[in-house]
Amino acid sequence: MASAARRWIIGRGLLGEAVARARSDAPFSVPIDWRDAERAKQTLSSAVSDFLAPTGVHEIYWCAGKGVTSTPRERLQEEVEVFESFLTALGRACAASDAVVVLFLSSSVGGAYGGATGGPFTESSPTAPASAYGEAKLDMERLASAYGEAHGWRTVIGRLTNLYGPGQDLSKGQGLISTLVNSAITLQPATIYVSLDTLRDYIYEDDAADVISASAARARVLGAGDTVTKIIGTGRAVSVGAIIGELRRLRRRSGFSLVGQGAAVGQALDLRVRSEVWPDLDGLIGTNLPEGLDRVMRARLDLLTRG
């Protein structure tokens, strides 16, 4: 049944590429210039009519977003506006179609609970954003739910924990694991902005994609206009110090240089989570941290070897 759905994955970074790999079918694709918000709006609006058929199941995965906790508020607001513009165009197109639309929105545990205390956090925990990034993510969640209710879409909001994998883009200034792996290989100091006892839940890219794909398939049986929010993570938080220890073991080296260690704005010390929604889907997560770190390290070494 899942293979019968027409898929559109918007945003083809670390997460989007993993979601594309989660199934064997080729998803709908259109190149989008994210550097220009107005152009991105126009491209997405035009592509909606090409994607949406009169009938059938249509899965849309919004995996786009360049924002991080340090991104200026005005830049984050642009991302929210692009998303709302897309929802508006999709709503207009759906008015003339009998298609069943399943919308998945990639959101953030760090954004939702960055200012909260008393983890582990669940889907029923009150949200408490600690930055403009968190506020923007929650704004997008509200938009997805509201538009979904208005147009009868089945909506899944996935609050992801810290995503990592060989495809991490180091230029975004995020991805602690990739930063530490790069430092372990090159012996260059790693710049981090949180303390070594900071607790995070790290999920491997393909594991996250498997849960997302299964969530979208399950969402087809939801009532029209319903929204489900699910935390997507391993449920096992580790400290930054523990990651460094594991990298030392993998590289068989004791040294590790860190600079800039401290408390960053919008970064909570403890972001342990536990999902209470569709918990059986968490059984799809099969990559433990040592395995994932080894894969990232091998991919980085291969890249350096190939120049």
Image (cartoon, grey):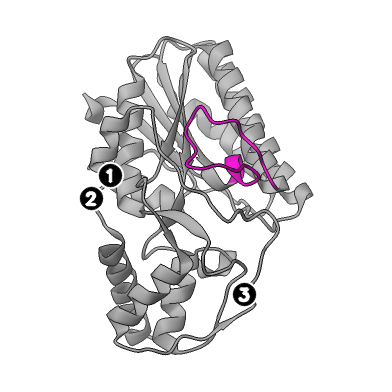
* Above or below for 154 versus 83: above
Choose the circle earlier in sequence order: 2 or 1.
1
Seen as rendered, the residue at the extreme right is 74
Say whether marks 2 and 3 touch (CB < 8 Å).
no
Residue 236 within the segment the image draws in magenta: no
| Alpha carbon separation for disc pair 2 and 1 | 14 Å
Three-letter code, disc 2: Gly
Query: Which element is circle 2 on?
Result: loop
Residue 22's disc is 1
**Which is more N-terminal, label 3 or label 2?**
3
- Mark 2 to mark 3: distance in Å? 31 Å
In terms of sequence position, does the residue under pointer 1 or pointer 3 come before the other?
1
Q: Residues within 10 Å of mark 2 (few under 14, many from 20)?
A: some
Q: Which residue is drawn at 63% across and 35% down?
A: 138
- The residue under the point 52% across, 29% down is 48
Q: Mark 2 points at which residue?
A: 286
